[in-house]
Amino acid sequence: MSRIGVFICHCGENISRTVDVERVAAEIGKHPGVAFSTDYKYMCSDPGQTLLKKAIQEQKLTHVVVAACSPRMHEKTFRKAVEAAGLNPFLCEMANIREHCSWVHENMEEATVKAIDIVGMMVERVKKNRVLPTITVPVTKRALVIGGGIAGIQAALDIADCGHEVILVEREPSIGGHMAQLSETFPTLDCSQCIMTPKMVDVANHPKIKLYTHSEIELVEGYIGNFQVTIKKKARSVDEDKCTGCGVCMTKCPQKKIPNKFDQNIGMRTAIYVPFPQAVPNTPVIDRDNCTWFKTGKCSVCQKVCGPGAVDFEQQDCLVVEAVGAIVVATGFDLYSIAEKPKGSPIKGYGEFGHGKIPDVIDGMTFERLASASGPTGGKILRPSDGKEPKQIVFIQCIGSRAREKGISYCSKVCCMYTAKHTMLYHHKVHDGQAYVFFMDARTPGKSYDEFWRRSIEEEEAVYIRGMVSRLYQKGDKIVVMGSDIAVGVQVEIEADMVVLATAIQPQKGADTLAQKLGISYDKYHFYSEAHAKLRPVECATAGIYLAGACQGPKDIPETVSQASAAAAKVMTLFSRDKLEREPIVARVREAGCVGCFACKKVCAYGAVEEKEIRDRQGNLIKVVAYVNPGVCAGCGTCQATCPSKCVELDGYTDEQIIAMIEAL
Amino acid sequence: MSTRVPDTSIYFAVTEGIRAEANRLLSAGEVTAIVGYTTGRRTGSSQPIIVTDADDTARLCFSVTSVNNLAVYLTKAKKEIPKNGKIGIVVKGCDLKALVGLMGESQLKREELYLIGVPCVGVLASTVQPSTELTAETIAPKCRECDAHLPSGCDFLPDVALPPLPQLDGKYTAEIARLEALTPAERWVYWKEQFAKCIKCYACRQVCPFCFCEQCLCDRNKPQMVDTTPRPSGNTAWHIVRAMHLAGRCAGCAECERVCPMDIPLNLLNRKMAKELKELFDYEAGLEVNDKGPLTMFTEKDDQSFIK
């Protein structure tokens, strides 16, 4: 005979504002099987949990239903409390009367009736819950870090310094990411290369870090503690073991006019190249689309001049499988292109700015390359069109960002600061030049950030104009910038030599595809979603996968580094134990009915379903049935939904329980 | 010869071919049994037979009434077939698709079968007498839209050339188009009428090679998934379960429709599902042994426009 205890939470006023909790407690007290029912202001608080534990012991409760918030919030809390009181934790269920009821309704009467229904359903479900023993699984103490920008580098170094092996995968031929492209960094104006490249070298030299550059994630299988990751090593056409990085191949390559992506396509590179001189690894890669050998079958100069014979035209893409226990995703960002209007995307581009057709209208990253000492101009600010020094320069903020009509409503967070930095860099390099900035607001929260912005105006003579630009057009060799100054209430027209757009930060292209491979969620902009916006900001809802840097949302360098270290700390917490305790909510096969069609095996995303032979006493094979490995099963229930003969049941969610819930309505 | 009438004269040669091959197989001990057709009691009719003795192979035949999909004898009804050894089976193109599907679902192994293919110009509709001649009017609806007159990949195929085939308009295609033109409410009325006729005899289930579950979920009572009595709610539930379980698997042998005593157009539902699968995933059941059907896998090419 069940003696079920029901505990209704007010959640301060979150629930009791729209649900008459006393009435729910009274009504549910009459439900068959319910022995005890009460309500309390904060069930999750210490007195609330004490009340629950006391009731279990005094009332000799057999099952518990806590009607409160989402189980994602506090299921663990209450199961722990139930366990402390001597019951199996899996005899406790939560009825969500907050997110599913009080928060989404206004009418108290109706919401109360609905809450009674929700709790009644959970009472019926918990009646059929079984005592479940905890499952333990081994942990592979190796981590995968996807993305070799500052976020990935920091996370990899932190984990590796703790003594665990790290696999760092980077799509480009070199690690470094966007930070390696920057000239100076706010708010201290230290040179990005100076602080970045030593970290890149640390990665290359670290005995615990295995670096895969020019590689991509092909497939991710498994689950927390036990992932199998297939990595595609794209053909580099240069043998990494033989190459000494002498660079002769690059000097001899006859193809010299290929726009270098690292220099935002304003600098040129050869067909066999390293993206930048400080690249890690310092091993060139052949760009097969532009290489004469690959296009015509003639040339092979690089092969002839290579002393160690490292150039290998026959190299193929190859797949490597690595076993890891945790994954840090640090794929970073991309910049909004004013010209591009991707198909099926809400991004609209900027027709009023010439859709990116005016050569001296550049984005912030291109300005970084112009200002960079290692950039294509050697650190001189020169116009891409004619190489002249711009004497009047206009910066426009919030391009794409905070522009709902252009498809993006968020703030890109770093543009106010980097535009302020750009005005300073410009002022330092072009003493007789004048910088203008069109801005909506200056958002400068952060240590020494506002001081930095003030400095750009007060000491570095930048003119800030509050207002937006309506149109840009070419007039002779000038660009006419038409905007408004809303502080004064006048139209402004500036004949600029160069215009720099602070374009919005967007997730990397293909972020959604990678998320699908990893099984993690993302928002409408394809930024990856954290498990909880406030309390679990670096974890994904998918266990064992963590986020670092701008792939989760726009971030500056300090914030990215903090998040990367936080993600590393989470990985180290996971690796601190040899065995991982897992929820025993797993699927079981009713072997008598299983016909072995293995539909369950085909749909299982975790590879948990195996084939099992059933033999009679003489050892004759009777049939082959499905078997769910409880150590691997993640309890998603897809097999249960797929099984045509309904022979797979997920503990806690059996068909019997679901039908009992429906019938309780 | 008018192309309005399918030429069935090849069936004599086909029969001869099947008999000779079956005799050879059983005499040489290459197979332990052969599932095929034999003549029935009524004039012109035929029925399934399992031959285990070479002397009985003369009883095998193939005619316009060899309608049954024999694949079902390899799954549910397999208890009648000796367990050990290879089994020979006579297959039309449409039946082969079912075998291919069953192989993909781990129910059959190709190496345990010997496929005796049949060049087929069509069989009779279940609504006419077995002695009727095969014409454009009497041909089974599924044969009108057949694209597998010659089964491919068989171990043996009688050396008979297919005669020119008549071009017949597709009845299922026309009927699906008619129903698609209706409003959802009108369609619902149509199917409600059809399902109301059901007497829950489960003949459709018993004859279907893909309904191979040891215990159908409709027969379970803990919990009771589907109302067992032939009343509208349970009938509708059953037919939806049947159609959904066959989506992406049914290749259209139309046996369900043939055996339905209440003339419910069951294959029409199956064909509509197949059409959806073709349009959504460019997938046709039974063409090749697939480890995963479109409904049990996800690819990046899948339509995701429904995710808002």
Image: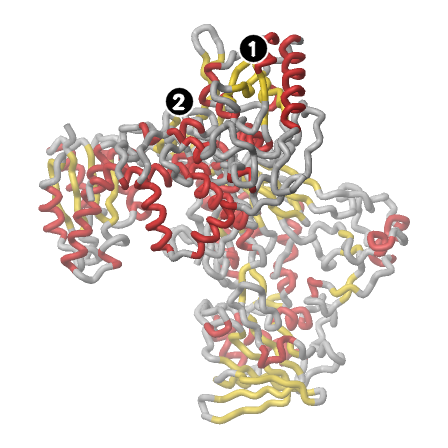
The amino acid marked with disc number 2 is Glu
From this view, report whether residue A272 is shown above or below residue A646.
below
The number of numbered discs placed on residues in the rendered structure image is: 2
Q: Position of residue A202 (x, y in %)?
A: 63, 49
Give whichever of A463, B251 is nearer the camera: B251
Compared with A313, B15 (above or below) is above
Q: Residues within 10 Å of mark 2 (few under 14, many from 20)?
A: some
At 68% across and 67% down in the image, what residue appears?
Answer: A264
Q: Callout 1: 10 Å neighbours few (<14), some, many (20+)?
A: many
Residue drawn at x 22%, y 31% is: A87
Q: Is residue A609 visible?
A: no
* Horizontal side of residue A118 vs A554, given as left or right: left
CA distance for labels 2 and 1: 32 Å
The label on residue B52 is 1
- The residue type indicated by label 1 comes to Thr
**Can the viewer see residue B169?**
yes
Does label 1 lie on the same chain as label 2? no
